[in-house]
Every structure is written in structure tokens, then in C-alpha cells.
Amino acid sequence: MNNFVPEISILVWAVLFGLLVTIVNLFHVDKFGESEFWLAIIKIIALIAFTIVAFLIVIGVIGDQGYIGTTVFLGSGGFAPNGYWSIILTMVIILVNFQGTEIIGLAAGECKNPEKSIPIAVRNVTWRIIALYIIPISLLVSILPWDKAGIDDSVFAIALSNYGLERFSALFAFVVLTAALSCSNSGLYGTSRALHSLACMGMAPKKLAYINKKGMPSNSVIVSIISCWIIILIYSFDATETAFTYLLALSGFTGAIAWISICWSQLVFRRRLEAEGKVDTLKYKTPLFPYVTHFGIWVQVFCLVVLAFTPDLRETLYIGVPFLVLPMLIYRFSSSRRSVAVDIK
């Protein structure tokens, strides 16, 4: 927002957009779905437009540079100018950007016909990642030299500005904003639903399992929202990049742990069904099982190992591991106390 209205403090924008996301999530799930629909439409249209424009730049239709081909992609030191280890480290850092598809499973409980809608969503997500992530990024690195990228603005905007498309680059600054809102919106939705599920299984306070008349886990939503506002409060005291970096690292760590758990649970679940001869009852079967599931587990484990052996990223584990272990210990302790109480009775 500083690109559009630099006079207003970053904290003010954080509070305003925090209120917007709060209001959306306090309504019924259809309001969330509608807001996500329009935010997603903006992103999709922008990425499709960028893909077309970038392709025209590569073949020399736009700009006076002529045909580019792989000149930029393989220039300035080649495909890996700082070595392939740099690519691996970058993939670990941006791991959080490729997480979020687990929200499909969380949304199943609020779908009218999940046995049909969820399998369709699962099948489509692969093609959407290719169309909306892989292809645009491939074209981006084909028109923007790596040594001209920065963190002060969207790399999409920087790339387009290099070819005289300043107005189009300003549009992408707005798209980045909508993407951030969408991420906050869906993240808050997923957090509150996961918290509600934990409460239903006895792994969180029972009050968080409450469902209001609109079918929303309102208590879990409120607790999740309060957590977000605590983060905004922390940011008001520390507006440096340090707080943001730690939060980003923590998101990547917890996401990796979540996906290891998801894949592991699916592996155990399928094995049990196979032992009982009930695999045919599944509405959706994972292709190439169990190889894809094992791949998902060990890739995430590899990323955590990279974090542990990289000094600049090791702080992630210092924050993430206590957040992982402490709730598990609390649950074990409370479960033991309940068991003892039952035995006494």
C-alpha cells in the first residue's frame, strides 16, 4: 500500500485489513467463499494476463529487444549462478507458498456434497499449480535477470517495468495486495476449522467445538482471530523485517509438519482399509499409492533437515519445535489425568 498511499503508516493498513478479514470470517461460510471467489478471480486474470504478455516479450512481439528465447534464463552466470544448493535453500524458504491445498479437506465438513466436490477439487489442484505457478514463474525468469530482482516491489512488476509496461506493473502491485488478503482469509478459515476439529476429538478445550445456528465454529473463529490480532500488536512494537521473517519461517515449519502428518495418516488409514478389505469404499483413491505418499513425507523431512543444517534458517526450529512439542505434552498430561480420574471412579 506504500506504493499507492505512502503517507499512511504500515500499521494502519495492517489494522484496516485485519478488520476486513475479521468481518469476513465472522459471517457464514458462504461469505468466505464469495470473498475468496472474487479474490481468486483477480489473481487468476492477472496471472493469465502476465503469462500472455511475458510470452509475447520472450518472442519479441512486445518491446524493442527482439527475440529473447533463453538468453535471460541462461544469462548472468547460467541457470544456477550461485550453485544448485542455493536453489534448494530457496525452495525450503518458499515452502510455505506451496502449502494451503490441505484446506480442501478442512472445507469438506461444510460442503453439501463433499463426495463429489472434494475429488474434483483434488484433481484440479495439480493443473492449477502448473497453470498458475509453474508456467508464469518460468516465463518470469525468462524475462527478468536474477540479479535485477529485489524485495522492494513485486518481481512481476519489476519485470514488466523493464520493458516499459509501468502501468501494467502498477496493476500487479494491487494483485499482490489481493493475494495477501486471500492468504490471510483462507489461513484464518483453515486455522479455525482445524481448531474446531481438535476440540471435537478432545485435543482442545470443549468450548471450541461449539457450532452456532449458522453452522460456524464461532468460538474457534474468535480464538483464531484474537491470535491474529496479537500478531498485529507484536508488529506494532517491532515493525522491522525480523518479526516478519520469524513468522514466515514458522509458517513453513508448521506447514511441513502438517503435511508429514497428513501423508502419514493417509498411509496408515489406507493400510488399515487394505487389511479390512474396504479400499473399494473410498470415494477418491490417491494415484500411485503408496509411492506418492512416501515421496510427500520424505521431501518434507529433507526440507526440515536442510533447515537444521543451515545457520541462517536454524532459528525456525528454535521457534517451531517448542510450538510442536508443548501442545503434545499438554495433551498427553491431560489424557493421563482423565484416565486416572476414570479409574478412581
Image (spheres, rainbow, N blue to C red):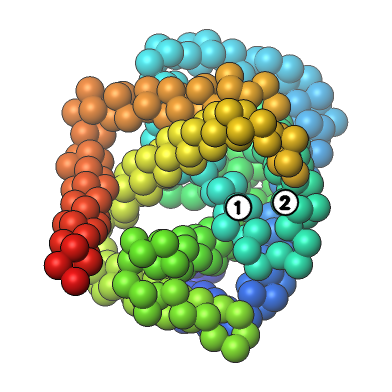
Mark sitting on residue 118: 2
Q: Furthest residue to the right? A: 61
Number of other residues with Cα within 10 Å of mark 2, as a class: few under 14, some 14 to 19, many 20 or more = some
102 and 328: which is toward the camera: 328
Tag 2 secondary structure? helix
Q: Left or right: where does residue 59 sit relative to residue 296? A: right
Among the two numbered marks 1 and 2 on one chain, the one whose residue lies closer to the N terminus: 1
| Residue beneath the point at 24% across and 51% down | 328
Q: Amino acid at mark 2?
A: Ile
Q: Left or right: where does residue 334 sit relative to residue 34? A: left
Residue 171 sits in which quadrant?
bottom right
| Residue beneath the point at 37% across and 79% down | 207
- The picture places residue 86, in percent across and down from the top left corner, at 39, 20
- The span from disc 1 to disc 2 (Cα, nearest Å) is 7 Å
Number of other residues with Cα within 10 Å of mark 1, as a class: few under 14, some 14 to 19, many 20 or more = some
Mark sitting on residue 105: 1
Mark sitting on residue 254: none
The reply to whether the C-beta atoms of the residues labelled 1 and 2 are less than 8 Å apart is yes
97 and 288: which is toward the camera: 288
264 and 80: which is toward the camera: 264
Q: Amino acid at mark 1?
A: Gly
| Residue beneath the point at 51% across and 23% down | 294
- The picture places residue 161, in percent across and down from the top left corner, at 62, 44
- Whether residue 14 appears in this view of the structure is no
Q: Quadrant of the C terminus?
A: bottom left
Relative to residue 318, is residue 28 depicted above or below? Answer: below
Residue 234 sits in which quadrant?
bottom left
- The picture places residue 53, in percent across and down from the top left corner, at 78, 39
Tag 1 secondary structure? helix
- Whether residue 219 appears in this view of the structure is yes
72 and 260: which is toward the camera: 260
